[in-house]
């Protein structure tokens, strides 16, 4: 997803959510994926063949709807001179709009990554899996925590940690049993330690080698000294994996709870990954909140007001925020009102209702996505926009406690 900035990614995800909510009454919805190396003429010929075959569909209504979708695609392809570098994806078909009604749904998307191969798919729902896979965070880091008692092996996938295996050693403590020479005891202890390191290396290698090499960005080793140093220097990992060790980090815990400690300890090494950047951003916000410096703001109305006076330095928007600003107006008396509603892909345009001033029917004159509105205001005020995931505690707090909108200010204002 490197080609997309965070706002573009949000818009793309929203379009997929809308398409995911649509369904046809029969197999009337067409999904067409065209890679860059496909000849437009070949696609047109294929669609014409499908058009002819649609005449044999038993249901006349379904046949006509399929032909209508194919006509739309053929009309669009007629004016397509060149397929974009990443390919192009078309969605077309008659969808159920409720109340026993139907309507035509058409969408054209330029994907964030190259379309791997040509796909023509007809079903009662749109085929979105290839595009949803493109949005998946592919960066993976192998995680190893160890001391002489236990080891935990897992991975940081995107912004979430996964535990693969927990291991426990048979290494004796430093106090030898009576009747055993100190030299013999130490010798047996070193053999047990070496065997434990071999077990860790074998399990970790087996787990990490299953990950696509292009996805495994590195391996992080945490735990107590000198165990982690001995493990790394002994090269107990597969030789290809040993090259991917990014560093050794001190952690107080070597069970699953130590993963958070390890991730926090690797900020300098992994400064570029989303999780670390987002955690650091939220720390700044919560620190400002705790010190009551007056240089933080939260909530839709307060943050909007600070954006309008260009006082915002960093704007925080939750990736789970789905709201839109609706403008209602009365054409008779001029009454106008704006309100914010939670947006869902499956919901229809909001009903306006009656004017509270004169009783006439209100009209919806404008609907704007909140993230789109706030992003535009932030750009005008040269504020940095940070999209925050809910996959970690502070990110969840942003959405639950602060409505998914917050900001760090350049200076103290009266609006918080």
Image (cartoon, grey):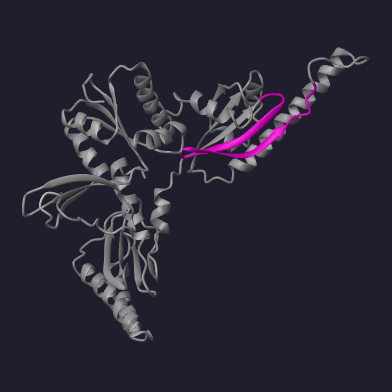
**Residue 112, visible in the rendered structure:** no
Furthest residue toward top: 182
The picture places residue 215, in percent across and down from the top left corner, at 48, 43
**Residue 379 on the magenta span:** no
Main secondary structure found in the magenta portion? strand
Q: Is the residue 210 above or below the residue 394 in the image?
A: below
Residue drawn at x 31%, y 44% is: 4
* Quadrant showing the C terminus: top left
Between residues 18 and 151, which one lies in front from this camera angle?
Answer: 18
Left or right: where does residue 288 sit relative to residue 193? left
Q: Position of residue 66 (x, y in %)?
A: 32, 76
Left of 169 or right of it: where is 252?
left
Whether the magenta-drawn stretch holds residue 170 is answered as: yes
Residue 124, x across and y down, in percent = 40, 70
Q: Is residue 235 visible?
A: yes
Residue at image point 40% right, 51% down: 134
Q: Is residue 401 above or below residue 17?
A: above
Return the residue nearer the eye: 209 or 178. Answer: 178
Q: Which residues are magenta?
A: 147-172
Q: In x, y percent, where is residue 175?
A: 82, 14
């Amino acid at each position: 997803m490197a080609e997309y900035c965070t706002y573009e990614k949000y818009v793309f995800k929203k379009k997929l959510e809308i398409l995911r909510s649509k369904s046809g009454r029969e197999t009337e919805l067409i999904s067409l994926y065209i890679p860059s190396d496909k000849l437009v003429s070949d696609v047109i010929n294929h669609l014409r063949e499908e058009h002819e075959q649609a005449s044999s569909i038993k249901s006349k209504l379904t046949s006509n709807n399929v032909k209508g979708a194919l006509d739309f695609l053929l009309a669009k392809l007629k004016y397509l001179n060149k397929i974009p570098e990443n390919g192009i994806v078309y969605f077309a078909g008659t969808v159920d709009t409720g109340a026993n009604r139907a309507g035509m749904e058409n969408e054209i998307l330029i994907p964030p990554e190259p379309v791997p191969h040509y796909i023509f798919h007809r079903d009662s729902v749109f085929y979105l899996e290839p595009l949803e896979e493109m949005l998946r965070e592919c960066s993976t880091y192998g995680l190893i925590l160890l001391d002489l008692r236990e080891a935990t092996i897992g991975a940081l996938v995107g912004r979430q940690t996964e535990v693969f295996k927990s291991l426990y050693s048979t290494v004796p403590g430093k106090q030898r049993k009576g009747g055993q020479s100190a030299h013999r005891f130490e010798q047996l202890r070193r053999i047990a330690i070496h065997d434990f390191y071999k077990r860790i290396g074998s399990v970790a290698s087996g787990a990490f080698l299953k990950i696509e090499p292009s996805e495994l960005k590195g391996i992080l080793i945490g735990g107590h000294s000198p165990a982690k140093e001995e493990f790394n220097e002994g090269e107990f990992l597969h030789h290809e994996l040993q090259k991917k060790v990014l560093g050794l980090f001190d952690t107080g815990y070597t069970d699953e709870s130590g993963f958070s400690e390890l991730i926090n300890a690797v900020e300098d090494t992994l400064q570029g990954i989303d999780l670390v950047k987002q955690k650091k951003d939220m720390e700044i916000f919560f620190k400002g909140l705790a010190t009551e410096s007056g240089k933080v703001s939260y909530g839709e109305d307060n943050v909007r007001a600070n954006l309008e006076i260009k006082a915002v330095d960093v704007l925080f928007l939750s990736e789970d925020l789905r709201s839109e600003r609706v403008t209602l107006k009365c054409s008779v008396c001029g009454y106008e009102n704006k309100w914010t509603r939670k947006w869902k892909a499956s919901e229809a345009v909001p009903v306006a209702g009656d004017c509270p001033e004169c009783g006439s029917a209100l009209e919806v004159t404008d609907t704007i996505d909140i993230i789109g509105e706030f992003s535009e205001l932030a750009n005008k005020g040269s504020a940095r926009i940070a999209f925050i995931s809910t996959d970690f505690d502070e990110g969840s707090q942003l959405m639950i406690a602060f409505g998914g909108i917050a900001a760090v200010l350049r200076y103290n204002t009266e609006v918080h």
